[in-house]
Image (cartoon, rainbow, N blue to C red):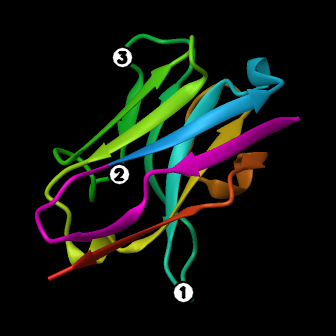
Amino acid sequence: QVQLVESGGGSVQVGDSLRLSCLVSGRTFSARAMAWFRQTPGKEREFVAGILRSGGSNTYYADSMKGRGSISGDNAKNMVYLQMNSLKPEDTAIYYCAARSGFGVTVVAALYEFWGQGTQVTVSS
């Protein structure tokens, strides 16, 4: 099993920045690909960004986050981060860290076996 714990959410103003963190524990070698998803009430979980824990520059972003977000990992600390800049009200959501044992980042939430409990991000104008 892989355990994921998110932190770093909060209430911010439009244009502010936030860095979300995800601590990976347990059978960390099973977490080959990591991703951040977000969800608002009544909607499906939406892919935000993903990264391969094997390193390199294998990062992927949803169009809504390109140019504003940066996903990174620190395998020595078993951490994955999502830096979000120029936040907008539409970024308001619960943000989830996800991991999958399969090879490759995918935007399909159902293909991730492990999930954190989520952290709330609220952006106010």
Q: Which numbered dot is residue 62?
A: 2
Q: Secondary structure at mark 3?
A: loop
Q: CA distance from mark 2 to mark 3?
A: 16 Å
Mark 1: secondary structure = loop
Q: Are marks 1 and 2 in contact (CB under 8 Å)?
A: no
Q: Are marks 2 and 3 in contact (CB under 8 Å)?
A: no
Above or below, 47 against 92 in this view is above
Mark 3 and mark 1 lie on one chain; the one further toward the N terminus is 1
Q: Secondary structure at mark 2?
A: loop
- Picture coordinates of residue 62, whole percent (x, y): 35, 51
Q: Which residue is pictured at 38% across the width and 65% down the height? A: 10
From the viewer's perspective, is 37 left or right of 109? Answer: left
Find the distance from the CA under tag 1 to the CA under tag 2: 19 Å
Residue position for label 1: 41
Tell me what residue is drawn at x 48 percent, y 41 percent. 21
Instruction: Judge from the rendering whether residue 14 lies leftward or rightward of residue 64; answer left or right.
Output: left
- Badge 2: few (under 14), some or many (20 or more) residues near its Cα, within 10 Å? some
Most foreground residue, 94 or 62: 94
Measured Cα–Cα span from mark 3 to mark 1: 33 Å
Q: Which residues are magenta?
A: 1-18
**How dense is the environment of label 3, judged by Cα within 10 Å: few (below 14), some, or many (20 and up)?**
few
Q: Are marks 3 and 1 in contact (CB under 8 Å)?
A: no
Q: Quadrant of residue 76?
A: top right
Image coords of residue 98 (percent x, y):
64, 46
Asked whether residue 60 is drawn in magenta, I would say no
Q: Earlier in the sequence, mark 2 or mark 3?
A: 3
Which amino acid is tagged 2? Ala
Dominant secondary-structure state across the stretch colored magenta: strand
Q: Nearer the viewer, residue 24 or 45?
A: 24
The location of residue 97, given as percent across then percent down, is 58, 48
Residue 101 visible in image: no
Disc sitting over residue 57 in the figure = 3
